[in-house]
Image (spheres, grey):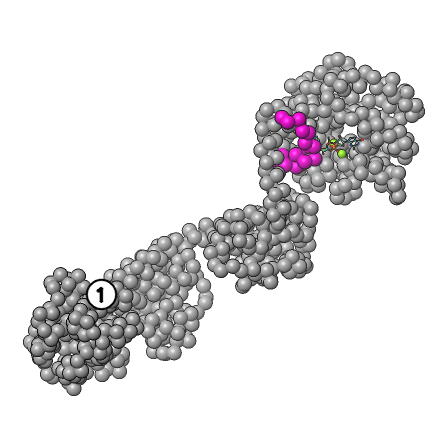
Amino acid sequence: MTTSSSSNEDFFQFADALDAPVADDDAIPPSPWRILIIDDDEDVHQATLFALKGLILFERPLLFLHAYSAAQAKEMLLHETDLALVFLDVVMETPDAGLQLVGFLRHQAKLNATRIILRTGQPGYAPEHETLLRYDINDYKTKSELTHHKLLTSVTASLRAYDQLQIIEAGRRGLELIVNCSGGFLNQNDLRDFAAGVITQMAALLRTGTEGVVCAHHNDDDAPYTIVAAAGRFLPCISRTLAELDDPKISKLLGTALLDRASHFSKYETVLYFGDQKGWAMATYVATRTPLQSVDQRLLSVFSVNLSSALRNFGLVEKLHNDAYVDALLLLPNRTSLIESLSKMLLSAPSDDVLALVDIDDFAEVNDLMGHAYGDQLLKAVGKCLADEFGGDVRVARVSSDSFGLLGSSQCISYERIKHSLDRRALVAGQPHLVSVTVGMAPRSPEVHNGIDWLKDAGIALKYAKRSHRGRFAVYSQDMAQVARQRALMLEGLHKAFGDGHLFMVYQPQVNLRTGQLIGLEALIRWRTSTGVYIPPDQFIPVAEQSGLIVAMGDWILQTACRDMQLLKDQGLAHCHMAVNVSVVQFQAEGFLNRVVHALQTHHLQPRDLELEITESVAMLGREVVDQVLTQLRDLGVAVAIDDFGTGYSSLSYLEQLPVDRIKIDRSFVLKLAGPGGPRIAEMITELGHKLELKVLAEGIEDGTTWLALRGMGCDEGQGYFMSKPLALSDLMVWLVQWPAQFSAMDLL
Ligand code: C2E
Ligand code: MG
Ligand code: MG
C-alpha cells in the first residue's frame, strides 16, 4: 500500500493496493468521485491527471471530466448532480471568466456542495479574500503548485468536505420527507414518502449512497408484503410484492425481519425493522460500502425505535382519519371525504367529471315501517350495489343518511347505469328489495371553485328531481339555481312576514249539499307583502315545510283559527267545525298533539269544534305515527279529514284502517265533471267514502250545475267559490248572516 501523507493515511489508498472489503461479494462497487477540471491550458489537465491518476480516496476511485473554456464548463455543470470537486482556472476567455463561473455553479447549476479549487498562472489574479468567502471556495493555488503532494492534500480535504456536506444534505432531505408526512398516512402516497425518507435518512447515517428497499405490511390485512419505497437499482420494484423483488437474497432478509419483528445487521447489509404492534410494520434494506461499525449499529437501533413510535402515531392518526373520513356503517368514504375529493379534482386540469347524488326514495318510510335494523341493511345493500357496479374509476361515498355520491367521468356515470345496478340486486336479509332512487347530477363546471359548491349544485339538482322527477333524475342547470335562490329569498321574506304580522287567516265555508246548511269553515292562510302583493300558499307552504318554519307557523295558524272560532261561537254565528290544514312536517313534529289540546283549551273550544285536514302523505307516514297521533286525536274527539283525496298514492286497504271522518275530493276531479270521462273519479271516491262510512266533501264548486251533479252522485258536502271565496273574519261574519237567504234564493232544492 502506498500512502502519501501520514495525516491522511486512514483515508486513501491506491487502486493497485486494494484491500479485501471492497472485493467482497456482498459489496456494491463504489461510485467514483466526480472531478471536473476547467482550464484552457491542455498541459494543466495532463499535469493534474498525472498527479492524481489511479488514486482511491475513502475507498472510492476518482473520475475526471474536462472542460476547456468557461462556456463549455457551463454546459457541463448544468447536467451534473453529484460533482465532488472542480479545479477552476481563473483566467480563460476573460480575465475573470473563472470567477464568474463560480457564481454560475452555485446559483444556476445549484451545486452547493461541490468543492472548488481555484488556480491561476499569475499570482496577481488572485481573488480577494471576500470572493473566497462569498462563493464558498475551498482552496486557491497557483499553477506552479501542481505538485503531487500539494494536490493530494488539497483534494483529500475537499472530498472529505464534500462528503460531509452531502451527508448533511441527505439527512436534511430524509428528515424533511419524514417530517412532512408526520401528520399521518392519509393515503398511500404519504406512506411512500415516509418510507423514502427512511431510506434517505439511513443512507445519510451510514454515509452510503441512497440505495435500498422498504417493504411494508399492514398487520390487519392478509395482503402480501409490498415494496413501498426503493432507491437506486431497486427503483423499478416499487409497488411490487416482496416475492417479486428480483433479488431473492434481499427478499428473504426483508421477509425474515418482518416475520421475526427484528432488525438484522451483517458486514455490508443492514435490515432495519420498525413497526407498531397493530398497524404498520416496515423493514428497510440498505447495503453499505464499508463494514458496519458498532457505533452505526447503535445509531440505527435508536433510529429504529424513533421510527416505530412515529409509526404508532401514524396508526393513531390513521384511525382518526378513518373516523373523520369513513362512514362507520357502510365503510365508504363520507361527505367530508367526498368534498375533499371534489376540491382536489377542481385543482386538476379540466375534465368531463360529474357528481351524481343518489337518494333512496321513501327511505324514512321504510325505516319506520320495517325498523332501523332493516333500514341499515337496505343502506348497506345499496352501497354495495353501487360500489360493485362503479368501484374503481368512480368514487362512491355516503353523503347523508339515505343518499350516496358518485364522482367520476361522465362516460361512466349515467342514471340508467345507477338504476341497472340496483335492479333486483339489492338484497336485504337475502331477499331482493325493490329500490327506487332519485338522482341529481352536477357536471364539473368552470364556475364552481370548491367541493362544497359542487356538492351544493348536485343537491339543487336532486331537490329539483325530488319535486318534479321523483324516481328519475335531473341535471343541474343555472335555472335550477335561480329557483333555489328564489326559494331562499322567499324563506327569508316569509320569516320576516311571520315576525312582522303580514300573515293572516281567511275562512271558506263548507256546506251540506242537500240542505245548504253550514257544516264547517276551512282556515286558509294568506301572505300579503308590504308592497301589497299576495303570495299564494301553494308557493310558500312548501318552503316553510322544507325549512321547518311550518312548525311554528302551524302553531300560530291553529291558535288564530281557534281564537276566531271562539269569537264566532260567542256571537252565535257558527254552529259548525273549524277545519285547519296540517302539514306532514307539523304532524311529525314532537308535541303536536299537545299543541292541539293547548289551542282548544286556550280558546275554550270542544274537540268536536275542530277538524284537522291532512294529506294522503300524512296517512302514508307509517303505522307507528298514524297509530300514535291519529288514533289519539280520534280518542280526543277531534275530527280528521283527508284533503286532496285521489292525488296521492295511499292504498285502499290502508285507507280502510285509518281512523278518519271525512275525505275531500280534490278540486281537479270536480273540475273534470263536465269534461270527457266526466264524473267517473268523483263518483268512485264518493262510493268508496260511503263504503268506508266516511263523509265525502267536494272542493272547488264554482257553479250550480257542479253542485247538482255532485249531489246527484251522492256527495254529501262541498265548498267553493259558488258558495263563497275564502273570506276575512269580518266579511265572513256578514256572509254567515246572509247565507240562509242566499241559499234559498239559489233554488237548488
Ligand atoms: P287546500 O287545503 O286543498 O285548500 C283549498 C284551496 O282551494 C284553497 O286555495 C282555496 O282558496 C281554493 N279554492 C276553494 N274553492 C275554490 C274554487 O271554487 N275555485 C278555485 N279555483 N279554488 C278554490 P289556497 O288558499 O290558495 O290554498 C292552497 C293550498 O295551500 C291548500 O289547499 C293547502 O294545501 C295549503 N294551505 C292553505 N292554507 C294553509 C294552512 O293554513 N296550513 C297549511 N298547512 N296549508 C295551507
Ligand atoms: Mg284543505
Ligand atoms: Mg284540497
Q: Assess whether residue 555 is covered by the magenta stretch.
A: no
Front residue (pair 322, 124): 124
Q: Residue furthest front?
A: 94
Residue 234 percent across, percent down from the top left = 35, 74
In terms of depth relative to the viewer, which is nearer, 721 or 337?
A: 721
Quarter the N terminus occupies? bottom left
Q: Nearer the viewer, residue 150 or 214?
A: 150
Quarter residue 15 falls in? bottom left
Looking at the image, the residue that sits furthest to the bottom is 16
Against 274, is 618 above or below? Answer: above
Is residue 287 shown to the viewer in this render? Answer: no
Q: Is residue 532 in view?
A: yes
Horizontally, residue 583 falls left or right of residue 127, namely right
Residues rendered magenta in the picture: 530-547
Looking at the rendered image, the quarter that the C terminus falls into is top right
Q: Is residue 447 above or below residue 600?
A: below
Magenta stretch prevailing secondary structure:
helix
| Residue 347 x %, y % | 47, 56
| Up-down relation of residue 270 to residue 745 (above or below) | below
Which x, y percent locates residue 283? 34, 67
Of 623 and 583, nearer the camera is: 583
Picture coordinates of residue 13, whole percent (x, y)? 14, 80
The kind of secondary structure element at disc 1 is helix
* Residue name at image x 73 percent, y 19 percent: 729
- Look at the image and say whether residue 535 sits in the magenta stretch: yes
Question: In this rendering, is residue 94 above or below 613?
Answer: below
Q: Residue at x 53, y 60 (%)?
A: 351
Q: Dot 1 corresponds to which residue?
A: 103
Q: Name the residue: 19% across, 71% down.
A: 94
Q: Quadrant of ligand 3?
A: top right
Residue ranking furthest to the left: 6
